[in-house]
Image (cartoon, rainbow, N blue to C red):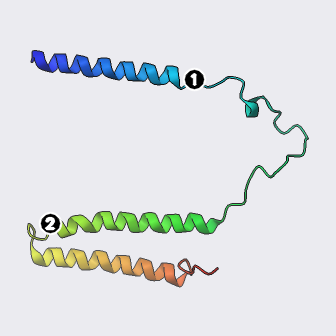
Amino acid sequence: MFSTMIASLIIITITSIVMMLASILSKKALTDREKCSPFECGFDPKSSSRLPFSLRFFLITIIFLIFDVEIALILPMILIISMSNIIIWTTTSIIFILILIIGLYHEWNQGMLNWTN
């Protein structure tokens, strides 16, 4: 009991010291050039402040995240094969993979997997 309290006190002390050091060392200059410059005051900017963003990159990111989540769901299925009923496991796996294949077909049908456009 006493050693737990000492360990907790040490952890709280180290955490507090690190937080204070981080707040002291991370102070930035208050006179930042961008903060002191006028905002929308009628001057022509040297370059465009907003670069064009392709929606294609956003959609590719969403597709990547979907497939990443799918892998995170498939890996535990492999690990529990020995601990579960084989018929229920097979049925669940087939249904899950069928849903993934239907989603992939839908993305392909909508043209989201065409890299040449």
- 22 to the left or right of 117: left
Look at mark 2 in the image and give the residue it sits on.
80
89 or 62, which is in the foreground? 62
Q: Residue at x 68, y 22 (%)?
A: 30
Q: Is residue 63 above or below residue 35?
A: below
Please tell me whether residue 65 is drawn above or below residue 110 in the rendered image. above
Numbered mark located on residue 27 in the image: 1
Label 2 and label 1: CA atoms lie apart by 50 Å
Give above or below for 44 relative to 104.
above
Q: Where residue 60 sits in the image (x, y, percent)? A: 53, 68
Residue type beneath disc 1: Lys
| Residue 43 horizontal side relative to residue 6, left or right | right
Badge 2 density bin: few <14, some 14–19, many ≥20, Cα 10 Å: few
Give neighbour class at mark 1: few <14, some 14-19, many 20+ (Cα, 10 Å): few
Q: Nearer the viewer, residue 116 or 80?
A: 116
Horizontal and vertical percent position of residue 32: 71, 29
Q: Residue 86: where, in percent of width, then height?
A: 11, 76
Q: Secondary structure at mark 2?
A: loop
Q: Is residue 111 left or right of residue 13?
A: right
- Residue occupying the point 15% across, 75% down: 88
Marker disc for residue 39 = none
